[in-house]
Amino acid sequence: MNTKLKRNISISYVYNFFLQLNITSAIWVLYLAFRGMSLIEIGILESIYHITGLLFELPTGALADLYGRKFCVVLGRIVDLISCILMITSKSFLGFAISFIFSSASMNLNSGAAEALIFDSLKELGEEDNYKKIWGQLAFVMSIAQGTAVLLGGILADNNFLYAYMLGAVIQIIALLISFNFNEPPVAQESNNGRVHDKQENAIIKQVVTSVNVLKGRKAILYTIMFSALVGSLQTTVFFYSQQYFFDMGYTTTVIAIICALGSLIEAISSKYAYWFESKLKLKGTLIAISSLNITALTGLAFLSKLSVFFYILTAVTGGLAFTIFSDYINSGIPSEYRATILSFDSLCFSLFMIFIFPFVGFIAQHVGFSITFGVTAIAYIPVMVFLMKKLTKHSKEKLMNEKIVIL
C-alpha cells in the first residue's frame, strides 16, 4: 500500500501538469469577444461559472469524502472534456453558458478531491510535514504548465482560435487517462460522534453539515480560507481581464501570451520557495506582505500604464505565495474524513468572491476603462482585507489538530 500511495505523489506531478496545461486560459476572454460577446456578457458568463461552483462545491467535496477522491477526479476530467467540446461548437450566449456550467462542475469535482488525495496519501505515509514543500513543488509544476499553455494558446489564437480549443480537448483526454492511475488513500473515520460511511440518500447532506460544524470550531481556518479566496479572486480577475487590458494597449495575442507566460513562471518560482518566505515572516507577516503587494499592483495598473507588465507580474508573485502557504495552513487544521468537503468550502468562498468581483470589474471597465477600474478595485479591497486580517489575528491562538497556527 505504501508503494501505491507514494506513486500518488509522482502521478500528481504529471496529472497536474496536464490539468493546468489549459491553452485557452489566456485567450478565452478574447475568444468570446471574437464570437460576439460583450465585456458585460463575458462578466456574466464568468459569474455563471462561479454561481455553479457555489452550488456544487460542497456537495462534490462531500461526494469525494464519501465515495472516493479518485472517483471525483476522474469524473471531473470527463465533465471538463464535455465543456471543451461545447466551447468549440456553441454559437450563442446560452451555449457558452452551458459550457461554463460544465467547466465549473469539473473544477468542483477536482478541487477538494485532488488536494485531499495528496495530503491524505502523505498522512498515511507519515510524511504530512512535507506537504508544504511538496505542494510548493506541485504549484511550481502547475505554474510552468500554465505558462506553457498561455504561450501556446496565444500563438495558436493568432492563427485560429479553434486550433487552441481543439488541442485543449486532446490535452484533457490525456489528463483523464492519467487520472485512472491514482490510488485511493485510506481515510480513518471518527469513532465517537463521527459520521457513518453509509449510502443513504442524506449521506452527502450529513457530510456537508458535519463539515460545516467542524469548520465553525476552527475559526482561524475559516478566516484563512476567506483571505485565501479573496487573494485568489483578485489575482484571477486581473489575469483574465489583462487579456483585454493589454489588447487595448495595442499588444498582439502572441505578446499577451508571452506576458502571461512570464507571469506564470514568476508565480511558479514564488510557489516553489513560498515555504522559505513564510518561515521568515510567519503567517501574519505573510498576510501583510501579500496584501501590500496586491494593493501596489492594482494601483500601478491604474496609474502607471507604462509599467503595467511589471505590476501584472507582481500579482503573480502574490498568487504563488498564497496558493502554497494557505493550502498548508488549511490542510494542517482539518480532519481527514472532512478534508475534501472543507477544501471545497475554500473553493466555494473563491467562487463567492468571483461572482461579485468579476462582473463588477467588467461592468466598470465597459464604461470607464480598465485603468480607473483597477484603481477602484484597489480601494474596495483595503477594508475587506483589514477586516479578515483582524479576524484571523483574533482567532490565531486556537488549537488546530493539537497544533497552533503561528502568526507572530
Image: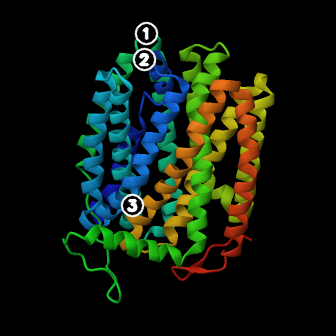
In this rendering, is residue 108 above or below 118?
Answer: above
**Discs 1/3, front:** 3
Q: State the image coordinates of residue 88 (x, y, percent, origin top left).
A: 32, 23
Total marks placed: 3
Q: Which residue is mark 1?
A: 159
- Alpha-carbon span between mark 2 and mark 3: 33 Å
Judged from the image, the secondary structure of the residue bearing numbered disc 2 is loop
Identity of the residue furthest to the right in this view: 303
Name which quarter of the figure residue 7 lies in.
Answer: bottom left
Residue at (70% x, 33% y) in the render:
373
Q: Which residue is mark 3?
A: 58
Q: Amino acid at mark 2?
A: Arg
Q: Amino acid at mark 3?
A: Leu
- Alpha-carbon span between mark 1 and mark 2: 15 Å
Residue at (67% x, 68% y) in the render:
392
Q: Which residue is mark 2?
A: 35
Identity of the residue furthest to the top in this view: 159
102 or 47: nearer the eye?
Answer: 47
Q: Residues within 10 Å of mark 1 (few under 14, many from 20)?
A: few
Residue at (18% x, 71% y) in the render:
199
Q: Is residue 111 left or right of residue 68?
A: right
304 or 117: nearer the eye?
Answer: 304
Judged from the image, the secondary structure of the residue bearing numbered disc 3 is helix
Mark 1 in CB contact with mark 2 (< 8 angstroms): no
Judged from the image, the secondary structure of the residue bearing numbered disc 1 is helix
> Looking at the rendering, in which quadrant would you find the N terminus?
bottom left
